[in-house]
Image: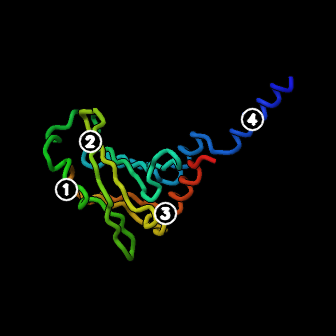
């Protein structure tokens, strides 16, 4: 009987120490850290990737994923061209009223889909935290030939990071 009581207390303690995965996902949606925009039959889905301390992630960097796909699910043609994989760091930046922050690295992710491409966007975390309100600007010369912006809040990113840390 006492073993069951101790096991129950341990489970309750573990649940109380950290936010659940559902809480983190819901908070990301509420704080616009998962955004989707449709422009000219292309769907752009931006998602912030919180780092987990102790999981081998570099906690000095902030990671975002940008998935670009056709809205109809039709395979995208021509994405094998080198322009979709190289020289991408000039296409992305964080912009506010006073400053523009360039990306540390942009890498195309091999995700195995034929109806889109996916990019990992890497920025300096300290600079992202310092920006209270900014926009991630995508100078899209690859798909729609437009400027696409995603509003972000540095305080929301700091909040999500605090929820995703293990205690």
| Displayed quadrant of residue 68 | top left
**Crowding at label 3, few (<14), some or many (≥20) Cα neighbours within 10 Å?**
some
Determine the CA span between mark 1 and mark 2: 15 Å
Question: 69 or 52: nearer the eye?
Answer: 52
The residue indicated by pointer 3 is 154
Give the number of the mark in front: 1 or 2.
Answer: 1
Q: Is residue 86 above or below residue 129?
A: above
Q: Nearer the viewer, residue 60 or 98?
A: 60
Residue at 53% x, 49% y is 53
Can residue 70 be seen here? The reply is no
Residue beneath the point at 48% across and 49% down: 51
Mark whose residue sits in front, 4 or 3: 4
Crowdedness near tag 4: few (<14), some (14–19) or many (≥20) residues, C-alpha within 10 Å:
few
On the image, numbered disc 4 is attached to which residue? 10
Position of residue 30 measured from the top left corner of the image (x, y, whole percent): 53, 51
Q: Is residue 89 left or right of residue 17?
A: left
In the rendered structure, find residue 87 and report the number of the disc placed on it.
1
What's the distance in space between the residues labelled 3 and 1, CA to CA? 26 Å
């Amino acid at each position: 009987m006492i073993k069951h009581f101790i096991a129950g207390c341990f489970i309750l303690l573990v649940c109380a120490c950290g936010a659940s995965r559902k809480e983190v996902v819901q908070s990301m949606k509420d704080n616009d850290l998962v955004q989707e925009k449709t422009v000219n039959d292309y769907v752009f889905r931006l998602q912030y990737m919180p780092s987990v301390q102790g999981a081998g992630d570099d906690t000095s960097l902030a990671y975002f994923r940008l998935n670009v796909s056709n809205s109809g699910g039709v395979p995208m043609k021509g994405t094998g061209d080198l322009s979709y994989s190289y020289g991408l760091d000039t296409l992305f930046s964080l912009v506010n009223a006073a400053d523009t922050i360039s990306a540390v690295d942009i890498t195309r992710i091999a995700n195995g889909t034929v109806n889109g491409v996916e990019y990992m966007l890497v920025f300096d975390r300290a600079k992202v935290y310092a920006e209270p309100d900014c926009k991630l600007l995508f100078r899209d010369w690859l798909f729609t030939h437009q400027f696409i912006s995603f509003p972000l809040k540095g305080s929301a990113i700091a909040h999500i990071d605090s929820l995703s840390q293990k205690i």
